[in-house]
Image: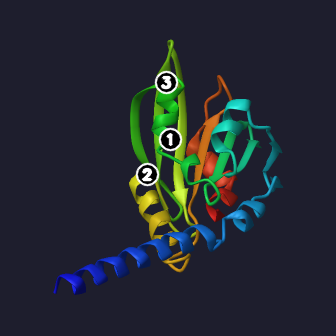
């Protein structure tokens, strides 16, 4: 009996090791195709690429990042879209980044967007007030829950990609010192919801 239990334990250990190796070595598709389809210019808006800062490049490493400033009507916003397929540690709850940069959350609320909900946060730092909107998207559904994002990516790796597309993180912030009417911006930049 003891030998049989030991054999089963060794078989389970070998299976777990084989699965972990498979998860590391079997390449999963990423969200590059969706990010590549995000237009730089469209009806009523225009954008330009913005280089990553040295800190951002160090944090994101192999993750795919699109960073742009979009002008839609009279409004300008910085859009950062992250695909963590190649660096799982690059994407985390945006609140950590805000707090790590010295911002305190003054208020936050859910905001309805096509296909789901985003999070609108009001931040304060040294008397300055700023806003940001963020959500996670797998191309079909949008939400602002970091635990749900982690569950989606874990399930995707366990199922070798069969559970769905790689979710991306979309973060929008007004250009420094400016304000944005988010509902108007969402109408003017509908391509953000195709990610």
Q: How far apart are the two marked residues, 2 and 3, measured between alpha carbons? A: 19 Å
Q: Is residue 191 shown left or right of residue 115? A: right
Whether tag 1 and tag 2 are in contact, CB under 8 A, the answer is yes
Q: Which residue is mark 3?
A: 103
Q: How many marks?
A: 3
- Determine if residue 145 is in view: no
Q: How far apart are the two marked residues, 1 and 2, measured between alpha carbons? A: 8 Å
User: Regarding mark 1 in the picture, which secondary structure is present there?
Assistant: helix
Image disc number at residue 146: 2
Image quadrant holding the N terminus, namely bottom left
Q: Residues within 10 Å of mark 2 (few under 14, many from 20)?
A: some
Residue 145, percent from left and from top: 42, 53
Mark closer to the chain start, 1 or 2: 1
Residue 189 or 56: which is nearer the viewer?
56
Residue 7 or 120: which is nearer the viewer?
7
Mark closer to the chain start, 3 or 1: 1
Give above or below for 137 relative to 176: below
Residue for point 39% across, 42% down: 109
Q: Residues within 10 Å of mark 3 (few under 14, many from 20)?
A: some
Residue for point 23% across, 84% down: 3
Q: Which residue is mark 1?
A: 94
Image quadrant holding the C terminus, namely bottom right
Q: Residues within 10 Å of mark 1 (few under 14, many from 20)?
A: many
């Amino acid at each position: 009996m003891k030998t049989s239990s030991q054999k089963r334990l060794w078989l389970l250990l070998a299976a777990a090791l084989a699965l972990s190796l498979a998860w590391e070595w079997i390449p999963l598709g990423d969200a590059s195709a969706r990010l590549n389809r995000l237009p730089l210019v469209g009806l009523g808006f225009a954008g330009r690429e913005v280089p990553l800062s040295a800190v951002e490049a160090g944090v994101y490493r192999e993750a795919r990042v699109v960073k742009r400033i979009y002008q839609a009507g009279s409004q300008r916003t910085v859009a950062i879209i992250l695909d963590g397929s190649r660096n799982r540690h690059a994407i985390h709850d945006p609140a950590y980044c805000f707090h790590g940069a010295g911002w305190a959350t003054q208020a936050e609320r859910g905001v309805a967007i096509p296909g789901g909900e985003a999070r609108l946060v009001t931040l304060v730092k040294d008397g300055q007030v700023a806003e940001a909107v963020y959500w996670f998207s797998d191309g079909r559904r949008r939400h602002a829950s970091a635990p749900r994002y982690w569950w989606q990516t874990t399930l995707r790796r366990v199922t070798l990609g069969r559970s769905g597309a790689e979710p991306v993180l979309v973060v929008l912030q007004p250009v420094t010192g400016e304000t944005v009417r988010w509902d108007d911006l969402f109408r003017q930049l509908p391509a953000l919801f195709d990610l």
